[in-house]
Image (spheres, rainbow, N blue to C red):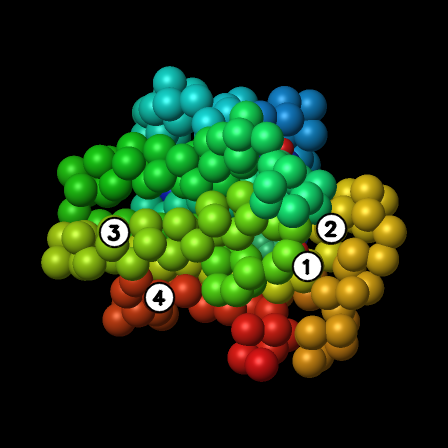
């Protein structure tokens, strides 16, 4: 549906879930795809599937909480394909539910270092490259947790609210330079992350589903569809915006 031929898409957390669905979507739309993840085995498997299917894909092992890894991943993308045109900053983690007074500072820091500082670090290096090109489009992956609170999830929701701040601010800073920054905010999506939550905490997803007007889980492909649109020229006047892809959760 979208034509990404000749463009390079950089996707973090690309070995699983929504990152993988977006990487597949970009590849099918003709992009060169850089798959970035810290899970080396899954990453290499997924990148190989794409290259075996005739797409141009590069796997880069990277922990987004480490600045040197991110810097190197962006450099590899540019040296392999010559540009970095669209980025989906999606890598993220979830933690067990715990009321705020029980959260250890080290666990709060770990959550923030991946889910917020990881996005910031990726944006910093992506934007430096896009500024040189005078063009680019960044899509961050937030969550319904960027709009509302859910008891037991203070650190995750703090990080996701922070992504909205980064998205809006960078949207303003770079719009006049031909670079758009936006985000998606998925609801409850059927990915390995949610499967893990179901296993760790009985009934947690069922409880959250009561607040989902559409009464089903979303798919990774439904989120990827919004990412591909936001990343493309079809969304050329959309700046600093966060789109909920959540079956109506935050519209309540
Ligand atoms: P997932 O667990 O299926 O995939 C996440 C991927 O990110 C994994 O491949 C993992 O290895 C990678 N990753 C984790 N930490 C990393 C790090 N430090 N560096 C590099 N890679 C790292 O999860 P998903 O459900 O596809 O989630 C993707 C994003 O969507 C996350 O940011 C998550 O917070 C967000 N999100 C998920 C849901 C949901 O319901 N699944 C809802 C809203 C938002």
- Mark 1 / mark 4, whichever is N-terminal: 1
- Disc 3 from disc 2: Cα separation: 29 Å
Establish whether ligand 1 lies closer than 8 Å to the Cβ of label 2.
yes
Please tell me in which quadrant of the rendered image residue 102 appears: top right
- Disc 4 from disc 2: Cα separation: 25 Å
Q: Are marks 2 and 1 in contact (CB under 8 Å)?
A: yes
Mark yes or no: residue 116 visible. yes
Q: Along the line of sight, which residue is nearer the eye, 68 or 179?
A: 68
> Relative to 189, is 70 on the left or the right?
left
Q: Quadrant of the C terminus?
A: bottom right
Task: List x then y, in percent, for residue 175.
Answer: 18, 58
Q: Name the residue under label 4.
A: 241
Establish whether ligand 1 lies closer than 8 Å to the Cβ of label 1.
yes
Q: Mark 1 points at which residue?
A: 189
Q: Which residue is drawn at 62% across and 64% down?
A: 187
Q: Along the line of sight, which residue is nearer the eye, 239 or 54?
A: 239
Task: List x then y, in percent, for residue 181.
Answer: 31, 55
């Amino acid at each position: 549906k979208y034509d990404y031929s000749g463009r390079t898409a950089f996707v973090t957390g690309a070995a699983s879930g929504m990152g993988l669905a977006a990487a597949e979507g970009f590849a099918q739309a003709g992009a060169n795809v850089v798959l970035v993840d810290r899970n080396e085995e899954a990453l290499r498997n997924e990148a190989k599937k794409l290259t075996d299917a005739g797409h141009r894909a590069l796997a880069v092992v990277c922990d987004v909480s480490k600045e040197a890894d991110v810097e190197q991943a962006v450099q590899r993308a540019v040296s392999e394909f010559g540009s970095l045109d669209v980025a989906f900053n999606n890598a993220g983690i979830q933690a067990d539910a715990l009321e705020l007074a029980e959260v250890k500072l080290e666990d709060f820091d770990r959550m923030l270092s991946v889910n917020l500082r990881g996005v910031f670090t990726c944006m910093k290096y992506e934007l430096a490259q896009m500024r040189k090109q005078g063009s680019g489009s960044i899509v961050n992956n937030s969550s319904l947790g960027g709009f509302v609170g859910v008891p037991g999830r203070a650190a995750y929701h703090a990080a996701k609210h922070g992504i909205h701040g980064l998205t809006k601010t960078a949207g303003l800073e770079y719009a006049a330079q031909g670079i758009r920054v936006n985000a998606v905010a998925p609801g409850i999506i059927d990915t390995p992350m949610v499967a893990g939550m179901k296993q760790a905490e009985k009934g947690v997803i069922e409880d959250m589903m009561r607040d989902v007007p559409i009464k089903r889980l979303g798919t990774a492909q439904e989120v990827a569809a919004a990412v591909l649109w936001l990343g493309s020229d079809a969304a050329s006047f959309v700046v600093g915006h966060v789109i909920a892809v959540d079956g109506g959760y935050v519209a309540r």
